[in-house]
Amino acid sequence: MKRGLFDLNDPWFRPLWRRVAVTGLALGWGLFELVAGSAGFGILFLAIGAYAGWSFFVAFTPGADD
């Protein structure tokens, strides 16, 4: 069952490497934007990365929607 715009409990996210890659990409892009001088986009992507990290590593329950 989809619970919003972004379904982070989708079976596609079951492999650990995908969860790490998505979280790392968002956090890395946020840091890049901050260094490049774009604070708005930096904060946005850091928030997305923090939400993904929390969803994937704290609240993640693989197979909950099967």
Image: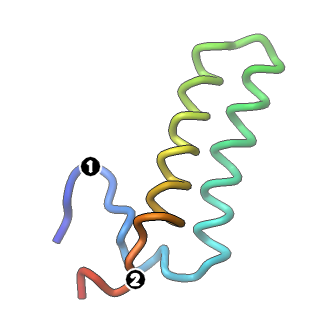
Instruction: Specify few, some or many for label 2: CA neighbours under 10 Å numbering under 14, 14-19, or 20 or more.
Output: some
**Residue at image point 39% right, 63% down:** 8
Q: Is 65 above or below relative to 35? A: below
How many numbered marks, from 0 up?
2
Instruction: Specify few, some or many for label 1: CA neighbours under 10 Å numbering under 14, 14-19, or 20 or more.
Output: few
On the image, the x and y values in percent for residue 22 come to 61, 58
Circle 2: element type: loop
Q: Is 26 above or below relative to 33? A: below
**Outermost residue to the front:** 58
On the rendered image, what quadrant is the C terminus found in? bottom left
Residue type, numbered disc 1: Leu
On the image, the x and y values in percent for residue 47 come to 53, 34
Q: Disc number at residue 5?
A: 1
- Image quarter of residue 12: bottom left
**Residue at image point 73% right, 24% down:** 33
**Residue at image point 16% right, 72% down:** 1
Residue contact between numbered discs 2 and 1, judged by CB atoms under 8 Å: no
Say which residue label 2 marks.
Answer: 62
**Residue at image point 44% right, 59% down:** 55
On the image, the x and y values in percent for residue 6 come to 33, 53
**Outermost residue to the right:** 35
Q: Earlier in the sequence, mark 2 or mark 1?
A: 1
Residue type, numbered disc 2: Pro
- Image quarter of residue 26: top right
Q: Is residue 44 left or right of residue 27?
A: left
- C-alpha separation, residue under disc 2 versus residue under disc 1: 19 Å
